[in-house]
Image (cartoon, grey):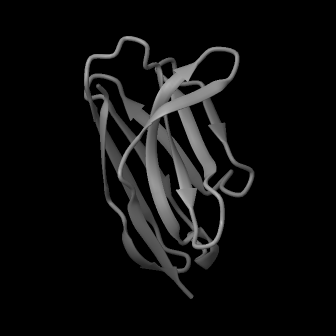
Amino acid sequence: QEQLVESGGGLVQAGGSLRLSCAASGTSSSINAMGWYRQAPGKQRELVAGITSGNRTIYANFVRGRFTISRDNAKNTVYLQMNSLKPEDTAVYYCVAGAYGRSWYFSHWGQGTQVTVSS
């Protein structure tokens, strides 16, 4: 069973940066993609970014150019570098893991980490 543990959330001023980390444990060989979703109060969860073991990436338009996803396959860890943060980036950020074939499918979720951006 895949387990995902996030860290790195917190409070930051607008324009600042944060780096989220997510360590995955488990031995599922079907997992070849990891990523991040977020959910703001009163809103649905939305994909932020994803990355495969071969470093194919996907980004939501609202973070393109500001956020960068990366991974360390040896450590089973995925990172989300968030720069130029805006108050509207405030949300709970969830690490996800799954598979990429012809599309992205995430079947495992972490517990979430709060990111708060003050204006």
84 vs 117, nearest the viewer: 117
How many callouts does the rendering have? 0
Q: Furthest-top residue in view?
A: 29
In the rendered view of the protein, which quadrant contains the N terminus? Answer: top left
Q: In the image, is residue 105 above or below residue 15?
A: above
Would residue 44 be found to the left or right of residue 38 on screen?
A: right
Would residue 63 be found to the left or right of residue 98 on screen?
A: right
Give how far across and how far down residue 84 sits, in percent.
58, 68
What residue is shown at x 47% (from left), y 57% (from top)?
93
What residue is shown at x 54% (from left), y 72% (from top)?
90
Q: In the image, is residue 79 above or below residue 86?
A: above
Give how far across and how far down residue 65 sits, in percent.
66, 53
31 vs 9, nearest the viewer: 31
Q: In the image, is residue 92 above or below residue 30?
A: below
Query: In the figure, residue 105 lies in which quadrant?
Result: top right
Give how far across and how far down residue 68 sits, in percent.
54, 47
Q: In the image, is residue 76 above or below residue 23?
A: above
Q: Furthest-bottom residue in view?
A: 119
Give how far across and how far down residue 18 sits, in percent.
42, 63
Would residue 17 be found to the left or right of residue 65 on screen?
A: left
